[in-house]
Image (spheres, grey):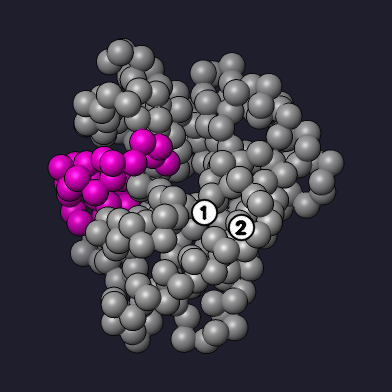
Amino acid sequence: MTIHFGPAGLGPVKDAVKTLEDYSKKGLEACEIAFTYGVYIKHDEDMKIIKEAAEKNKIKLSIHAPYWVNLNSSEPKKIQESKERILRCCEVGEKLGCYRVVFHPGYYGKMFPEETFDNIRNAVKDMQTIIKEKKWKIKIAVETMGKVNVFGSVEQIHKLIDETGCEFCIDFAHILARDKKVDYELIKKLFGPYKQWHCHFSGIVYGDKGEKHHKKTEKEEWKVLLNELEKFKDKDIVIINESPTPVEDSIEGLKMWQGLR
Ligand SMILES: [Zn+2]
């Protein structure tokens, strides 16, 4: 049973090597590169340097794909562009030695959940075909979503991975915001069979419609989550912290985890 802690965000390319060394010195073992507003690492040489630094410092890298993705748009062109954005992350992520590209699946628009599911499943399968053709090792991971009126409940995400074999990102803050509670028994039932878990975590402000924004992770919140995860015997878990202070919060989680072991 292993948990790798790390922040969302690598920061500027020019500081990346130093940043990874710094994370490693702090005991962190993961980092999610934020391509949320675009794929900002552009040169092959930079990718190579960052990949080597991550390997040297034993940091597991992942990518967060752009927010501007909707695999259930009513416009085919927008679905195509969304797939291309995720696949561009895969291409760059492969060169960076990343193991996952996390993405937000899409919106309902005017469609029913069933139709939405079918469209997203088809788009995921299309991307998997290309990833296979290119012989990339990187895997796409669909994230549980925090707003009530978008696709991405734990049940929907589970059905999607069941039907496509894609990877997943369990965002515990999103689940709390969407469902107003985290049903750990349900999560264990749905995701328990999978050994490798990629997770997001932070404090969160939410209302009736779900997620409003992320906030600092409270000690008590870490405690509840880690106590639940501690019950597993054989999982390999990455927890990416997405609070406004993700490095400090990751260190806090790591220290608490070490205290539990
Ligand atoms: Zn996300």
Q: Nearer the viewer, mark 1 or mark 2?
A: 2
Asked if the stretch drawn in magenta spans residue 173, the answer is yes
The residue that mark 2 highlights is 131
Q: In terms of image quadrants, where is residue 239?
A: top left
Looking at the image, do the residues carrying marks 1 and 2 touch, with CB atoms under 8 Å apart? yes
Secondary structure beneath dot 2 equals helix
Amino acid type, mark 1: Ile
**Residue depicted at 32% across the width and 26% down the height:** 234
Amino acid type, mark 2: Ile
Q: Position of residue 87 (x, y in %)?
A: 63, 61
Q: Position of residue 146 (x, y in %)?
A: 33, 58
**Residue depicted at 68% across the width and 22% down the height:** 56
Q: Position of residue 90 (x, y in %)?
A: 63, 54
Q: Is residue 206 visible?
A: no
Q: Is residue 86 above or below residue 175?
A: below
The residue that mark 1 highlights is 140
How far apart marks 1 and 2 lie (CA) works out to 9 Å
Q: Nearer the viewer, residue 236 or 69?
A: 236
Secondary structure beneath dot 1 equals strand
Magenta residues (range)? 172-198
Q: Is residue 150 visible?
A: yes
